[in-house]
Amino acid sequence: MSWGPGDRAGADDVVTGEGAVLLDEVRAAIGRYVVLPSEEALTAVTLWVAASHIQPALQHAPRLAVVGPTKGCGKSRLLDVLHETVHQPMMTVNTSPAVVFRVIGKNPPTLLVDEADTIFGPKAGEKEDLRGLLNAGHQRNRPAWRISGPEHKPTAFPTFAMAALAGIGDLPDTIMDRAVVIRMQKRKPGERITPFRSRYSVPELNALRDQLTACLTPLRGTASRLVPKMPVEDRAADTWEPLVIVADLAGGHWPARARAACLAMTRHEVVQDEQTTLKTRLLRDVRRSFERASNPEALPTQTLLAALVEDAEAPWAEYGSKGLNAYHLANLLRDFGISPANYRFEKGRQAKAYIRNRFLDAWARYCPEPAAPMPAPAHPARVMPPTAPAGSLPLGPPGGIAGPKLTR
């Protein structure tokens, strides 16, 4: 089966339509088992699957960030489908970085990481090495150096490998910036999918995987020489180039479809980034409102709204058609797991309010306070040679551990 332009590489080469037919079949199979958020997202996932089969020819290994606001959005099901269609899958939920370092070689696996939200953030601890590996592995020739073996010699471990990461909420910017982002949503009433059953789903998907392997493996040399025209630039072009290369090799309607998906999805992420920046601004402004009120355990929703809207330098007075309201506020904070609650204030008065302790985790993650500067010495000090620090300052949760007074 011929998939590409033979030994010549260039944008004007004539290709057969057989590759386009196979990609159509893969796309239809994925769409039967998973409801993707858009037609462009389905196209992107299809091309990402195919690109995994030409990994050795690529200069960049795009991440596939499969994120959703809650559980039950189909993230894990998509990973199940990927597991049966990508090149040499390695599914993991809680693996150690040492294992991943050792399985990545000249013919690396395609990493499929479920519950990826657990390996990032302040509580990641020993998993920071895995985070660094995922960042470095986006580009070829970015090895990780470790002391290894009985002789404790410095050893370079390859990191280059394609990876799909599924988790609740956005992943860190360093991952999202290197990823084709699939924003999953819960299925609406009436949206139907084919149940994923191993006895018939796996053989069907494996057959498509084998066809992709047979067709694309001989074209790795051709793929390595292709320099496709990209509709985007910089990091976005690095991330999407492998997908566009596959589309150009396939021919038919796929080159145009791939570039349309690239434009639509990268523009959507620009909007998402702007919205995320706005939400981070809201977290900072809420913290400032609590500080100006001497950090009470809770602020009534209307009091907090009034403080936000009255800030002349903030965008909240012009937000929406009539300024920020209670619905807007709750909607903007929902992704951080923050919502209003009934709270009993002094003299028995109850009202909907925002509890300060519920913001602590989001403040620490998205807008941490800058480190306090060291106080200036009372008397000039002699210049001394630098010495290693004797210790480190203890860390603790901002605001202490006291809980709010909630009413039931």
Image (cartoon, rainbow, N blue to C red):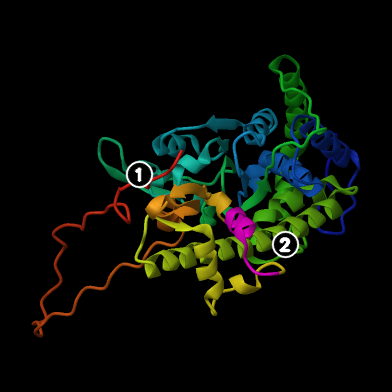
Residue tagged 1: 125
Residue 12 percent across, percent down from the top left: 87, 59
Q: Secondary structure at mark 1?
A: helix
Q: How many marks?
A: 2
Q: Is residue 94 above or below residue 391?
A: above
- Please identify the quarter of the rendering in which residue 95 is found: top left
Q: Residue 280 placed where, x, y %?
A: 52, 62
Mark 2 residue crowding within 10 angstroms, few (<14) / some (14–19) / many (20+) = few
CA gap between label 1 and label 2 equals 34 Å
Q: Is residue 339 visible?
A: yes
Q: Residue at x 75, y 62 (%)?
A: 230
Is residue 208 found left or right of 117 in the rendered image? right
In this view of the protein, which residue sits in the foreground, 310 or 212?
Answer: 310
Name the disc covering residue 267, or none: 2
* Left or right, 78 with reference to 168: right
Task: Specify start and end residues of the magenta stretch as a single range.
Answer: 322-332
Q: Position of residue 277 (x, y in %)?
A: 57, 65
